[in-house]
Amino acid sequence: MKTYMSILKILITIFVFLDTLKVSRCCRETVHFMEPGDWIENDKSGLCIYCHNAKTKYIIHTWKTIVMNLKTNLETYELYEGTSPREVVEKHEENQKYWRFSLFGNKKSKEFRINPFQDSCIGVYMNKQHNQFNYRMTMTQNNIDIWKLTIMVLGMFLFWFAQKLSRNTLFYYTIEIAIGVSLSVIILIYLLGKVLPKGKFMYLMMATGYTMSFYLAQILWENIQLIAMQYRNYVIYYILVTTFISFIICYRFGTVTNTRTKNIIQWMLQSFGLVLVYHSSFFREASISICVLLVLFYNFPVVIIQNGRKYWKHMFPDQRRLLTDDEYRKEGVVETKKALKGLQHYCHTPESNPWRTVLKLKDPIRFAKFMEGECHLSENESMEHDAELTKLIEECEYTDDEFDD
């Protein structure tokens, strides 16, 4: 028994060593670590791996994105994505073990947006059947990805205004018409299925229906611009007809009136908005924090925060400073002028009753002069005020002299 266990341990050790040696040899020969601004050309067949090491996260890099571009004229190549060279090699070797019918492999993406805060690797495998080929892999950096920023703004807008949108008639018709135009394709496929003959052919179509539907959808999406240009009139007529039919159906059944249904639509819009905000940045901690802040500010409005600040100031008021004599006189002059201008403005408004005001005055002529811009004090009153002020100042100075003595 001990002999069998020893042999088993030796075999496992040899297997692990050979596997590690194979992967490390492959990684050593084919792995290229790139930085933004680098580009690498390759004219050799086989698997070549391009990696980018994770960078430190900063809040200013919330919308940072690393873009890798594959520039080649060939279409017969294979792509593998992973977080390490070992993972890419394992996916490639697993793919080579099985025969695979590449129904969706006619068109491959040549631009990859990778997470700058995570180790990322992309493997490119060129078949040896092509004797002459050359491709280039480039890496660029976007400090602010406009697409990511747009997604975040859209998500915040949907979350914050979901209640108004769920009760807006124009928004309801717009969404319903868009859904109607999109679902019209499914209706056409259903009608086509009714026309097709029953029997074995129909069972074959049902068995391969999902695969063929995805395949046709991919072809339509990849050639949508070409189709729109070549069959522009038919596309316009199709959109107009389906839009009109969708509008008629929406108008017939009317908008949503049930309160609970409106609440469900609001919650769906808010959930979709939070999903957009979460996926708007590779900096997941920042996107999650923004989602939390949105929820908090939405459920605890600014009014509550302002009331909290007022309560805090009431409980812990700032230390008040008493005015000096000069500051008190200046404040009195400013407030008096402000009150007199307010009185003149009110008397010129339709809300005031001039005849009733005249009855209450002792000197209407003097008030009329004041309304025309003259001073509210007469010359005698000004002289008496100056004399009283001078007398008060002298008394204060005399009192100060007595205290000094």
Image (cartoon, rainbow, N blue to C red):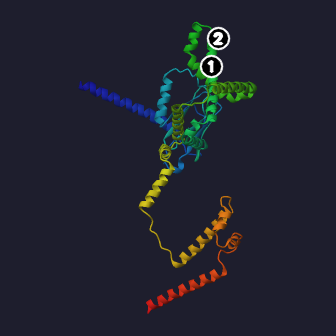
Residue at position x 45%, y 36% in the image: 24
Q: In this view, does 384 lie above or below 138?
A: below
- Decide which of tag 2 and tag 1 comes sooner along the chain: 1
The image quadrant that residue 176 belongs to is top right
Which residue bears the numbered disc 1? 187
Q: Is mark 2 on a helix, strand or loop?
A: helix
The image quadrant that residue 347 belongs to is bottom right
Which residue bears the numbered disc 2? 195
Which is more toward the observer, 381 or 261? 381
Which is more toward the observer, 234 or 355? 355
Q: Distance between the residues labelled 2 and 1?
A: 13 Å
Locate residue 356 relative to residue 302 in the image: left or right: right
Residue 40 placement (x, y as % from top left): 59, 40
Locate residue 12 relative to residue 371 in the image: left or right: left
Circle 2: residue type: Val
| Residue 131 in view in this figure | no
Q: Is mark 1 on a helix, strand or loop?
A: helix
